[in-house]
Image: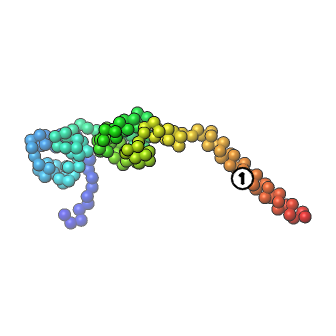
Amino acid sequence: MENETIRKVAYTLEDRLKIKSMIDQGCSMEAIAVKLGRTAYAIGGEIRRRGGKKDRYDPYLVFDDRKARVPYTLQDRKLLEECLSKKMTRASISKLLNRSIGSINHEIKKNGGIDSYIADQAHDNFIQYHHTPVRKKILQRIENIEFQLEIITSTLQEILNGKNN
């Protein structure tokens, strides 16, 4: 094993079906790992990602990457609130919402925490912060520039009046 490069290789459907059949036959993680040329740790990770436990392993479970960087909808937030009230784990919530655990943690933390998360309030905060109309932002910038121009103009007039006296 000297100077071997470790690289992550995605599991093909064929690999996942082999894992499922070996689980059904009662094989250990080590035996599955040897058969597929992986480590037992990697096989354990694959099983956790697609079911959590050996008996719930689903080789057809596909992760939807389209949710990456997509804001939470009000329905997502209501479901999150309901899951938190039922004391579900963050891992199970992340699978249900098809989001990473880190994303779930961030959403909960920035909107009051586990015990005080309110979906409607969280969504209102999101709308208020992220959906300020572009026109309003432009008008605020124009007002700011006009204010700065007034200050510059008055300063220049004071300087010119001081030179004239």
Q: Quadrant of the C terminus?
A: bottom right
Colour scheme in use: rainbow
155, 31: nearer the viewer:
155
Instruction: Say left or right for 71 vs 89.
Output: right
Q: For label 1, count other residues whose C-alpha is less than 10 Å away and answer few (under 14), some (14-19) or many (20+).
A: few
Residue 55, by quadrant, is top left
| Residue 71 in view in this figure | yes
Residue shown at 37% from the left, 47% from the top: 105
Residue 107, by quadrant, is top left
Extreme-top residue of the structure: 75
Extreme-front residue of the structure: 115
Residue shown at 41% from the left, 42% from the top: 117
Instruction: Say left or right for 79 vs 57.
Output: right
Residue shown at 26% from the left, 60% from the top: 5
Instruction: Say left or right for 65 vs 3.
Output: right
Q: Position of residue 53 (x, y in %)?
A: 19, 44
Q: Quadrant of the N terminus?
A: bottom left
Which residue is the site of mark 1?
148
Extreme-bottom residue of the structure: 2
Q: Position of residue 45 (x, y in %)?
A: 23, 49
89, 10: nearer the viewer:
89
| Residue 108 in view in this figure | no
Q: Position of residue 102 (x, y in %)?
A: 36, 49
Which type of secondary structure does the marked residue at label 1 adopt?
helix
Residue shown at 28% from the left, 38% from the top: 62
Instruction: Say left or right for 111 vs 96.
Output: right
Residue 154, by quadrant, is bottom right
Q: Position of residue 148 (x, y in %)?
A: 72, 53
Residue type, numbered disc 1? Gln
Q: How many marks?
A: 1
